Amino acid sequence: MLSHVWRLFSRGQRLHRRGRMMEAAETLEEALTLAEWNPEDPPKPGTARARLIARILTVRSVNLAHLGNSAMGLRLLDHADKFVDPSEQGMLLHQRAFILWQNGRLNDALRWFESAEPLLEVNGPDWMYAALFHNRAAVWRDLGEMHKGLESIQRAISLYANLDIPVHQAKAQHAEALLWLDLGDVTRALRAFDEVRAQYRQHAPELEAFVLGSYADALLYVGMYRQAAEHWGEAIAGLRLSGDERTAAVLEFWRAVAGFEYHQFEVASEWAKQAMNSLYRQGNEPMAFLAQLLVLQGQFDSHNEGLDFADKVSRLCKALESRGWTLRLNQAKILEARARIRAGDLDGVEELLNEEWGRSGYEALAESLARHLAKAELALACGRDPMPELSSGLNLLDDYRMEFGSVEFQSGVSALGFQLASKGLSNVTTGGDPAEMLAWAERCRAQALRVPPVKSSSDPEVREVLGRLRQARQRLWDLQVENKDTTAVLARIRELEDEIRAHDRSTPGPRRQAERIAPEAIHDLAERRSTLVVNLFEVGGYLRAVLVGNGTLRHTQLMRLDRAAEIGRRLGADLDALGTPYRLPPRLQASIETSMRRNAATLAEEIWDPIAEFVGDRQVVIVPHSKIAWVPWPLLPPLRGRPVTVAPSAEAWFRAANRPRATGAALVAAGPALLTARTEIDAIADLYPGAHLMHAEDSDPELVLKALDGASVAHLAAHGHHEPDNVLFSRLDFGQGPLNAYELLGLDQPPGHVVLSSCDLGRSTVAVGNETLGFTAALLHAGTSTVVSSLGRVPDDLAAEMMIDYHRRCAAGATPAEALAAVGEHRPWHPFVCFGALSLGHGGRRLFTQPVASVLLFADYRLGFL
């Protein structure tokens, strides 16, 4: 009978190690029943039965803690303590320490681990002796002692190396990676997560959910809040499926953190309350207090804090401190300080904010950013200048951003400073100095463009995976044509994209960035080029503009931003509807045209009319707010026929305008399934002597990429796909596979001028940090000065007709913006936009000389291309 019980115990223990908590519970309970366990009639100490039951209880106790019943787990240990064999007392003490740690009693846990260590060292078992260092590392991590945690986990790894338990080895390496993450070495941690994930897949697939949670941690650390919440959602579902309620509740807390940071206050509040209830039910008071603090943080950020708010925060902080808990405690203290500042109760606030708390890694960064924000608010409350504190906080983010090679991560970091940047922009706007407004608006956008690409796409291993990805996409195309099931190949495509993305995210950054450009330098360049830079930003819910380049800088308040964003969205939808490849019924087409005319006129009236007199007849660079990044500006009546360029920032325009242009042979290439592509590219190639010409049937993305490097001009007539949820894999389709946006970042000398004549690859996704990502954005980030692309679907015949005329003008000396203005003047609904810089044309002459008064209204035009 005992041999059967032993087998059940061994199986239950294995299931528990693999995270299959409910199955482990059933197996261990079956073992206890078969062993005739009765707490009222414990076994006689020293017997084989007593020893076996004690071992089962020590494992079942921790299993119960994971299932959310720590109190029962501790009671089982109390029962086992009465008859456990002295040689196995260390195991029992270890399990008690482990449960206390899981319930936030960190100092108590350390004391029990200390008591267990000499017993386990002498009596074993060896795997639990190693586990003691592993679990103690987790306690040090929660106490904020990361270096002590590293020392402990590395001892565990060295001990595990001599044991044949690969799952434990992987868990220890996972814990080490989490410590590197907390210390701020995100790229190193991500590389380790990938290795651990591979080990879990091989030895314990059930544990993969834990890595999903760890990836979410990393995404949180770089400001990718929405993506972090999605990862935590997947991890929580997997953990609940396995029965690990304890870890699921902790991840619910972190998902709520991400939700609040993403300003989803209502849903995040529900997540936080759910986590709080689960944690209280499980006896994890400190984490439950943190969840309660999170709800208060959401109330504060949404200005719904109510009476005695600061006192509520203060009481929770004291409750955490009394339990020796430090995780996010300092940020909670800063919340208390900010609440007192908002309430006008300033006594002792400055002393609180000047305390030295001694954190390290990401926690130190998060606390520093919060502290700088609070100190700036205190300065405002005391009538002092808040700008030094706000600038110092954003400078920290500049340094942090350079640590990452991933464009996604570089962009996401901006989200960490959202409140600092907004506070600074609001303050200088109140002060009324347009130069300061311009400087601060520039600190709020396109920060990733200041960091040079690290070209991880040129890595041989990545190139190999990209090749497999192209093959998979070709296979997908074939299956779609044959109307066959695509489930398996779609999963393969996602797997390969994830592999490439993981490599990119774990690539270290260049640790350098471009210098900032002074507002005066931007103004001088605009003056020299007879250009007016319209820099749009938001303060107080209103869209505002700083106008640069007509003798002085000027600030103007425009329309409500939300209204502008909604009108822009409707205008884009109408543009897409007109771009359909099917002929629309006359009444429907007329209705869409009327809607476009109305929406374009409204934007013109509320954005352009207030600044028109100051702009005069100058060519225009528009730096849009991220919420109106998709507005097709050339469709606005006053802008038709005027050279207009859209830039991600005024600094980006300045750098692009001054960047040396590539002088290599032009590239003209086409992809498949475009009816007029051959005529289009043959005519365009004739305009550029010595051009590389690639027809659809011969177009190879590898050859296209090679020809792009150093090209003076590149015209790509290929169907494109903007992937809003996976922007680095937005792509152009060529005859032998797709060219991904991600690959453009690896160019050594990007082409100076690129035209994308098909589809909607001018669109971008404002995914993270309020920065734009997409195919066009990737070209600009790589170093291309000017990109002409579409914000909507484009009929093939319209694209061919316009682009031939466009390149004829460029070849004659027009700048891209001038050429596009000229060819678009009599095609009022075209979706093409010039992005980047108003660089000089091939002949260096200016075509735009007509005053604004000569520009006709929409009503004077008829659509002739559908």
Image: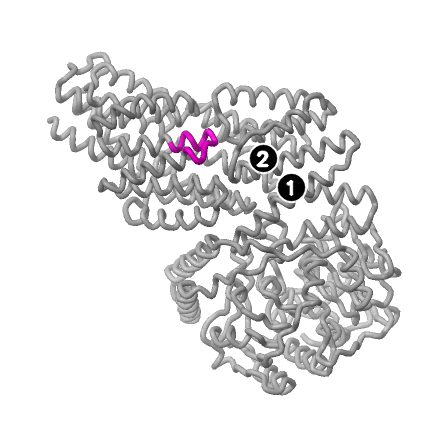
Q: Amino acid at mark 2?
A: Glu
| Amino acid type of the residue that numbered disc 1 sits on in the rendered structure | Gly
For the point 77% across and 70% down, which residue is it?
643
Q: CA distance from mark 2 to mark 1?
A: 10 Å
Magenta-highlighted residues? 137-148
Residue 525: percent from left, percent from top: 78, 64
Q: Are marks 2 and 1 in contact (CB under 8 Å)?
A: no
- The answer to which quarter of the image holds residue 424 is top right
Q: Earlier in the sequence, mark 2 or mark 1?
A: 2
Residue 78 shows which numbered tag?
A: none
Q: Which residue is mark 1?
A: 393
Q: Position of residue 648 (x, y in %)?
A: 67, 59
User: Is 663 situated left or right of 181 in this image?
Assistant: right
Residue matched to label 2 = 367
Question: What secondary structure characterizes most of the magenta part?
Answer: helix
859 in relation to 159, above or below: below
Residue that sits furthest to the top in the current view: 40
